[in-house]
Image (cartoon, rainbow, N blue to C red):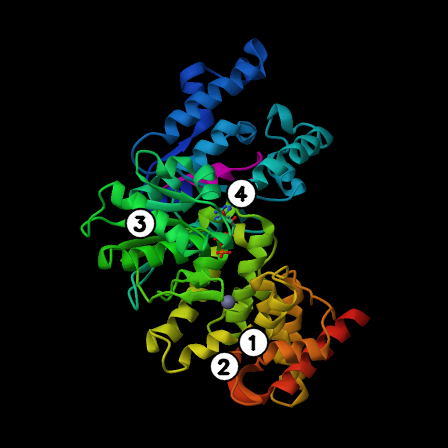
Amino acid sequence: MAKITLFGFMGAGKTSVGRELARRLGIPFFDSDTIIEEKFGNISRIFEKKGEAFFRKAEEETVTEILRKKGDFVLSLGGGAALSEKIRKTAITESIPIYLKCRVKTAFKRVEGSGRPLAKNFETFEKLFSERKELYESLPFFADTERKSAEEIASEIENFLSPEHFSKPHKAEISVISISETKKRFKGFYITDKNVFKLYRPLFSGRKGVSIPPGENSKTMRTVLSIYEKLLSYGITRNNFITYAGGGVVGDIAGFVSATLLRGVPLVAIPTTLLSMTDSAIGGKNGVNLPQGKNLIGTFYFPEYTLINPIFLNTLPASEIKNGSGEIFKYAVLSENGLFEILEKAEGDVFKSLVSKEIIAKSVKEKIKFIEEDPFDRKGIRAFLNLGHTVGHTVEKLSSFSVKHGEAVAFGTIVSAFYSLKNGFIKKRDYNRIIALYKKMGFSPPGSAFSYEDVLNAMMFDKKREGGTIFWIVPVKYNKCVSVRTDIKDIAKAYEEVANENTRN
Ligand code: ADP
Ligand code: ZN
């Protein structure tokens, strides 16, 4: 269970949704305004006699005190509570904050004539609404309340909060929990990077560990050696744990350190980027770079426990969200498990919305499906996960990695789809759906910066090449793929045509 804080403008339904949610979860419901009135008297009177500043101070104290209380509850806040940075921060650390979102007209209709002082005149109401909107939107999650009953919204939130567990091939869980709850899952020494450390200080307080510089350049044996030394100086034994919190870089390094130090120290994995949640943290691979190439050293080492918590996405830069979305787009085209349709329908800021958990869960499921059958990547089943990657890796390399992995993979996926269309493997209607989703997710082809020859040359270095051909994964439906032996010249040609078509548009 959890502590849940509901934010939103007056009329958003905080009280009715909050009550219903608390009833469903069997936990108490609190309304901050009611508690403030019990302590300080009638709110309108406080405003009149002591002014708004006094009220905001009283509100800040009361709300942070409630949030730090033990036990679970649903807390609905007054419309202006989001103005306080302290409230917003405490709500993220101690609870799951959800912004109940609705249009200004809907909100006004709901409170018009209720006698609330701020709801008398639409113009003032609208002004206040637009002033606060940005603050609400800075919160980790929102629930769209438009044209939905309190029961429906509460049920959607309940769904969002219910965790999903995987037991094979390793114990992983997708769970929306507060930072404080996340901390309880930590075991032993931590490994993180300096960005994550700064953003989530409370996670690491009172523990020993190592914080590495962020970025791919940290994935070296030098970093590994320095972590060994640090952890040994802390007296680490095989009875201890290592817990990592971070993206793919931290995961690769921490996985390798855990697998090799003292012949293996048990590991807890807490991926904090969209890409690591849906891809690199699943499947047990770790890796360290050498001057000769990326990930040339590494092992398969499964964490004892992996916690995927979407609350971390709140601080992730948009470019990193896009990076992860590329792999998610790939999973959608690979799988008939409904992911594609969910993404087609999703509205607004998808990874803050209540469907985010389901999108991540379905992506993880799709990856697990392939690795369960082939945990050590020996049977070629995992090859399906390479959809989009043959062209993707080429574009990444040719752009000297200025095109991010996820974007390159999404582009590679539409090149496969285009080839499939040209060869009559996929219907035009399905192809169009793939392209429409690609665009909806905010992707656009990197243009025809590289020539047919560049692409062909780069592909000659593909490890998976057999002579002039390669087993290529291509869609035969909008959500289903097959593996076909393909001439790499045809791949380069498909690349060129997709890239050119885009420049014309
Ligand atoms: P990935 O390989 O998963 O994309 P990286 O380890 O390269 O991830 O991390 C990408 C960047 O995002 C790094 O600068 C890292 O410090 C930062 N980062 C990781 N998690 C978060 C987070 N939850 N919020 C903000 N920044 C983050
Ligand atoms: Zn990938």
Q: Are marks 2 and 1 in contact (CB under 8 Å)?
A: yes
Please rate how many residues cluster around mark 1, counting C-alpha atoms within 10 Å: few if below 14, some from 14 to 19, many from 20: many
Q: Secondary structure at mark 1?
A: helix
Q: Which mark is residue 483?
A: none
Q: Which residue is mark 2?
A: 464
Image quadrant where residue 299 sits: bottom left
Mark 3 to mark 1 CA distance (whole Å):
35 Å
Disc 4 under 8 Å from ligand 1? The reply is no
Other residues around mark 3 within 10 Å, as few (<14) / some (14–19) / many (≥20) = some
Amino acid at dot 4: Leu
Q: Earlier in the sequence, mark 2 or mark 1?
A: 1
* Residue annotated with mark 3: 228
Q: Are marks 3 and 2 in contact (CB under 8 Å)?
A: no
Nearest to N terminus: mark 3 or mark 2: 3
Residue projecting furthest to the top: 49
Q: Whole-Å distance between the Cαs marked 1 and 4?
A: 42 Å
- Verify whether residue 344 appears in magenta: no
State which tag comes first along the sequence, 3 or 1. 3
Q: Residue at x 70, y 28 (%)?
A: 124
SS for tag 2?
loop
**Residue 16 image offset from top left, x and y in percent:** 47, 40
Callout 2, which amino acid?
A: Lys
The residue that disc 1 covers is: 390
